[in-house]
Image: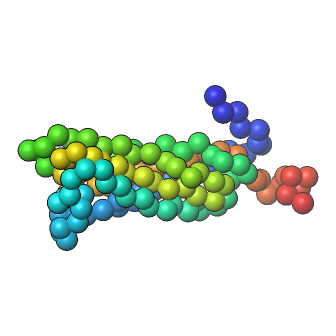
Amino acid sequence: MKRIYASTIGIDHGSEMLFSDFDNGGDMWTGEGERERRIAVSFSEKFKSHPNVMVTLEMFDVDCNANQRAETVAENVTEAGFDIVFRTWGDTKFARARASWMAIGGVDADDNWDEMY
């Protein structure tokens, strides 16, 4: 369990289009084997320390004639942002995918003079 020692908790969230490879014949749609997409996300404000980040697929369009394999994770989490990483492998063919994310952690409060200065 991560304990947050802060008088103020911040929650940031968003949605990111990861790719649309059906439109342009990209490798998520036409390729095979291990493939990865990485999208950098910046928080709207910095957290006091690394927040907890959750990522989930919000939308995906996948070929029904192949196995459906995917992994979506948050990596390189800092106070300022993180990377959404989408991976697939084998014969899986993804036409497009969008991910939602939420970050929760301690943030500075306007009246925390001792902690800010």
- In the image, residue 6 sits, relative to residue 78, either above or below, namely above
Closer-to-camera residue (28/9): 28
Q: Does the image show residue 62?
A: no
Q: Quadrant of the C terminus?
A: bottom right
Q: Does the image show residue 85?
A: yes
Q: Position of residue 54 (x, y in %)?
A: 49, 43
Q: Position of residue 61 (x, y in %)?
A: 20, 52
Q: Position of residue 63 (x, y in %)?
A: 13, 49
Q: Residue at x 23, y 66 (%)?
A: 26
Residue, far front: 33
What colouring style does the render use? Answer: rainbow
Q: Residue at x 71, y 49 (%)?
A: 49
Q: Quadrant of the N terminus?
A: top right
Q: In the visual, does 39 lie left or right of 81?
A: left
Residue, far left: 65
Residue, far bottom: 24
Q: In the visual, does 107 lie left or right of 21?
A: right
Q: Residue at x 76, y 38 (%)?
A: 5
Closer-to-camera residue (7/33): 33
Closer-to-camera residue (113/69): 69
Q: Position of residue 106 (x, y in %)?
A: 70, 46
Residue, far top: 1
Counting every numbered tag in the picture gives 0
Q: In the visual, does 69 lie left or right of 79?
A: left
- In the image, residue 69 sits, relative to residue 25, either above or below, namely above
Residue 37 figure quarter: bottom left
Q: Residue at x 91, y 52 (%)?
A: 114
Q: In the visual, does 62 lie left or right of 99?
A: left
